[in-house]
Amino acid sequence: MLFGAIALALVVGYGALASRAAPLIVPAGTLTPTPPPPSATVPAPRISGTIAFTLRGDVYILRGGQYFRSTSEGRSMEPSLSPDGRTVVFARTEQIDGKREVDGQIVPALLRYTNIVKKDAAGGPETIVLNGLRIKAASGFHAVAWQNGPSISPDGKMLAIVTDAGEGSSDLEVYELATGKRLSLLSQGSSLADPTWSPDGKTIAVTSYTLGAPRILLVAADGAKADPQKVSADGEYYRPAYSPEGAWLVYTLRHPKGGNDVHAVEMKTGRDVALTSDGHSWNGVFSPDGGSVAYLHEADGVIDLYAMELGSALTGGQAKAPLKLTRGEGVDGESRPSWGK
């Protein structure tokens, strides 16, 4: 009974973490069966640049009119491409048998953690940039870390992540990508998620849950200040991503009565533009040229990756009809895509 209680507590804990980082978006009910995940290269509409996304726990790369699987273990999430589209980093879940003290007793425990992994977007070997198994102790009392949301800086040299610090908090940290050396700790005791760099590398936008409901927070990369981003739309807003020139943030708006849509906010004025209105779209990112947005959309319980040419949508006009990029294999809804050159 004790072991069962511990297992239940772990499940509840990780469930709470997941719900904070990835709010519920798929409607309740039985999901439509999806085809097996593709193991071979799949034809896709041709778009500019490279998009990394996750499908059934693996990272896929879309470029040149096709997409292919870059990982195969089924435990990867949250990919981030370097600005040139050549390198992808992502988080991968791992676990180890260990021990914990509960109510004064030492009990076995299955400890979960995440590694931050780097590889060439075209394929090839992997490198663990940050190991979530911080200390492997002979006693079984290992020190582990849950590291989320890796985001490569515009110059390709730094990596921003959030690390679960326990007691409902998550720290924003910056590391050197080549060596894994920590360069700065930008928050302590906050509850942050979804870091994304401004094009000039001076600011990291995050989702902040510190006050409860999600909001967008702009954190100076040197740690000097953190300011909330003004958003005029009614609802809860999270998971921001910068436009290439830095004037706009695309984000997900959760409506007061439920449902999610992709919006953009002009940073200086707070002017808001709804890019979707179906209540089943989220996790938008700008293309490298700023002319399009990629995002996730759910229909009949199946999530796919879409791209939309913005046209004059940000200046009072209309966007073009969205283009479906994947084939109903079931894209992972928790991870936002990443778009590089």
Image (tube, helix red, strand yellow):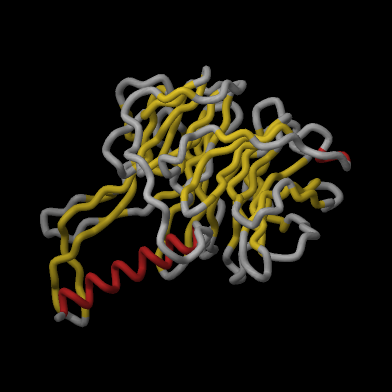
Tell me if 332 is positioned left or right of 260 in this view: left
Direction top: furthest residue: 64
Residue drawn at 66 percent across, 70 percent down: 257
Residue 273 vertical position relative to residue 98 in the rendered view, above or below: above
Q: Is residue 221 visible to us here?
A: no
Quadrant in the picture for the C terminus: top right
Pick whichever, 127 or 30, lies toward us: 30
Q: Which residue occupies the foreground of this view, 118 or 341? A: 341
Q: Residue at x 47, y 49 (%)?
A: 302
Left or right for 66, reference 4: right
Nearer the observer, 118 or 234: 234
Give residue 67's position: percent from left, percent from top: 45, 26
Query: On the picture, is 227 further left or further right than 258?
Result: right
| Residue drawn at x 63%, y 45% as measured from the top left | 204
Q: Residue at coordinates 29% horizontally, 34% vertically from top-left?
A: 72
Residue 7 visible from this viewpoint: yes
